[in-house]
Image: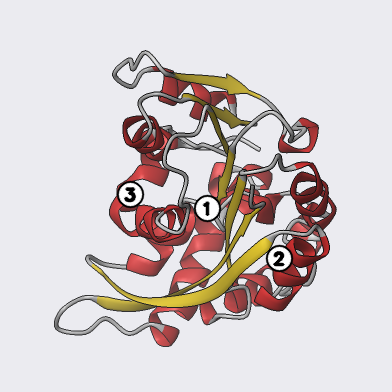
Amino acid sequence: MRWDPGLYARHAGHRGRPFFDLTARIDAPSPRSVVDLGCGPGDLTEALARRWPGATVRGIDASADMVDAARRRPALPNLSFEAGDLRDYRAGSDDVVVTNAALQWVPGHEGLVGAWAESLPVGGWLALQVPGNFSAPSHALLREHAGSPRWAAALHGVLRHDDAVGEPADYLRLLLAAGLVADVWETTYQQVLPGEDAVLGWVRGAALRPVLETLTPGETAEFETGYAELLRKAYPRGDHGTVFGFRRVFAVGHRPG
């Protein structure tokens, strides 16, 4: 699936806040090796490199477009980016493993998380964050619209839902089963988005990508017209913008020395 780094970055402030809330729980004073799995355009990975200047920090992403954008960032001596599938990553040599808003795109990622947790070295940290808003109107209406008579045939099987992410208790069990000290929580950010059709603009950056990848430009315009109408009713614009609830699930595991 192709990604648009510029479109994704339009809400960089809102999208970045969960990352910093997640990584604030990592109490690693001087790690040697840090990896960011699903690094996107690299701005948040750069923050890790600046936090730990003595560590080797790598960003890995399956999107060549995202990796290209990341490599255009200002060079830091301890930071690098590479293209790769998260399913190919093997933990064990990195002291800190971070994956932020990426695992929802990987079917069966719970098995990966369990394997990474089992392989985490003594003193190591594993931190993940995934969206928890698949039942929110933004996503429920997307699936409803995609399943309507007009779009059902073209978009059958394109959108995942039931198996996309786990609940907080699921990730807690995975970390505890691997012998880690676990810190798991959830947060719903009440974000105020500016402009017309603000929620549509938000989901274009991520949740709508599979649809955009499947339909032709003409079909995309038609699909978005109908979807935008549904979103306006679910998320009415107020005097200060459009309030958009943004639920996220966080899990941090640590293997004590």
Q: CA distance from mark 3 to mark 1?
A: 12 Å
Residue type of the residue flagged with mark 2: Val
- The percent coordinates of residue 23 (x first, y second) are 44, 52
Query: In the image, what residue type sits under mark 1?
Result: Ala
Q: Quadrant of residue 174?
A: bottom right
Disc with the residue nearer the chain's start (1 vs 2):
2
Residue 152: image location, x then y, percent: 77, 66
| Mark 3 vs mark 1: in front | 3
Q: Which residue is mark 1?
A: 206
Left or right: 231, with 167 as reference point? left
Residue drawn at 67 percent across, 51 percent down? 255
Residue 102 as seen in the image, left or right of residue 46:
right
Residue picked out by circle 3: 12
Left or right position of 194 against 251: left
Disc 1 vs disc 2: which is toward the camera?
Answer: 2
Which amino acid type corresponds to the residue marked 3 in the rendered image? Ala
Residue 24 in view here: yes
Residue 60: give its label: none
Residue 101 horizontal/vertical position (percent): 55, 53
State the separation of the CA atoms marked 2 and 3.
Answer: 22 Å
Q: Which residue is mark 2?
A: 165
